[in-house]
Amino acid sequence: MRCSVLYGAMRDRLDRAALSRMIAGAAAQIREQHPRLSELDSAAGDGDHGTAMLRSMDRLEKGFASGPPACLKTCFQQGGWNLFGADGGASSSLLGTFFLGMADGVAANVSSMDCRDLSLAFESGLNAVRQQTKAQPGDKTMMDALVPAVATFTATAQNGKSMEAALEEAAHAAKAGAEATRNFTARYGRARFLGEKTRGHQDPGATSIALLFEGFHDGLREPHGETGNA
Amino acid sequence: MPMKKFINRPENIVPELLQGLALAHPKQVRLVGNNLIARAKPKVWGKVGLVTLGGSGHEPGLSGFVGDGMLDVSVAGEIFAAPGAPRCLEALRLANGGAGVLFVVLNHAGDVLSSNITMQMAQREGLNVRIVLTHEDIAGGPKPEDRRGLVGFLPVYKVAGAAAEQGLPLEKCVELAERMERNARTLSVAVRTATHPATGQPIFDLGDDEMEVGMGQHGEAGTGRMKLKGADETASLMLQMLLDDLEVKPDEELLVIVNGAGATTLMELFILFRRVHQILTEKQIKLVRAKVGEFITTQEQAGFQLMIARMDAELIHYWDAPCDAPYFTVR
């Protein structure tokens, strides 16, 4: 895939430009899939998860497009604030919490990070979300996708794989986690009031997380020119 | 079928409705900052501020209760979605008059998340804020954390708002709000769905011959789907569940609120209220205060919420105190 070890190592650092591409990739996924997210949400909620996610990703992407500072910590912080500001109910609050938590896991004043740095940031983001919700994997929430995505990213990164490979694995894990929610009963959020009736429907929040990771991977992969838009 | 609603662009619903509210009631409210509804004339310095948050699409709730003797600032979110923490923090700063702020939060996942994040930020700034969570919907089950906040926010705003207006300290305002909240119980019923104004889709399905007791504020389904019943039978069924849950005894004093969901007429609400009154009279329970109307709605959903609250002399005193909000005035 890569011409040399040295080139690979240099490519394998995430800077502001690469982060912006990841965000853009995630926004593109949500833009394409938002009707499906709303449809999934109408099974147990009020059917507006897709529009809320669309609003969140617009805010997030705009924040990055308008020239964020090179300091990655500040990028994540601003991303978190922009998500909070999207007024998208629980989903934008939790996503914003994830980004602010990622900021906490990034050293100050660094303008690029390696695969291990990114996995520490993801872990820190997940911990911040855990402080806001008691939901565990199996409860039919975004945690069903987020927890395996972060764990898989970390494990893949520890095996010495590239950032792109780790994101690809993470996206697969998130997708599998989201699909598994079909068999679960909702225990959190508005959907919990439906209990058993939620079985058979895939959770929209988990689906969104899977799309975000898929989009992160798309964004990071694009300049390599391997497949273009998958 | 196209949605028959008088809206312009879906993304402009919230700012346009808030502009309309402020323009229609300029003596009571104004639109400030990032789409916050605040009192037309801020409270004098040194009194407790009262702030709330909640999704839009439930008019006149919650912004219709901003005014003298009630709320200081309301943070309206998007349709059926909680506003984020940045605007809530802006509202707390605005309402802070040096005596602390009481932040009334209805128990819904998004609202609770936003308010928790807001509290962390407020504490970092040194703002003195206390949260009172309302969760009086008995359809949620026995655990208070599973019970949603429905129209029971209204007496909490009223009582705490009156106490704050009279210059009582934050501790006392919190105590009154919590006492009011603890003694309130609500149950809702839906007979016909509403259209989500942003997506144009119905928010739930309900058969022509069915009703659902325990329906939440956004169409998140309840647990009591049953054959449609008449007014007296429905009122009686729901009232009995509320009386049992609150363990009301004869001679106790109740506030009763019948809140229309949007498409149920005042005619129907009065017919229902009349039956509630009859039953309470038979049981020798005192119906000391009542309100019948639309306080929190869900678009053109048909149905209603029935709230009962055990009152005492102090709660009645603050319920009766003057207030002047667009949708609640006591002179």
Image: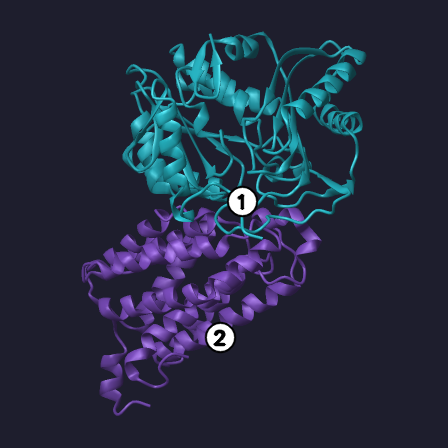
Q: Which chain is purple?
A: A
Q: Which chain is cyan?
A: B
Q: Residue at x 26, y 60 (%)?
A: A64
Question: Is any atom of residue B298 visible in this view?
Answer: yes
Q: Secondary structure at mark 2?
A: helix
- The answer to which of B290 and B192 lies nearer the viewer is B192
Left or right, A195 with reference to B171: right
Mark 2 belongs to chain: A
Q: Quadrant of residue B75?
A: top left
Residue A215 x/y as whole percent: 39, 70
Residue designated by label 1:
B4
Identify the disc placed on residue A172: 2
Mark 1 or 2, closer to the camera: 1
Q: Residue at x 48, y 33 (%)?
A: B105
- Separation of marks 1 and 2 at Cα, in angstroms: 42 Å
Instruction: Spot the residue most to the bottom.
Output: A3
Left or right, B147 with reference to B29: right
Residue A2 x/y as whole percent: 29, 89
Considering only vertical position in the picture, is B213 above or below B28?
below
- What amino acid is labelled 1 in the image? Lys
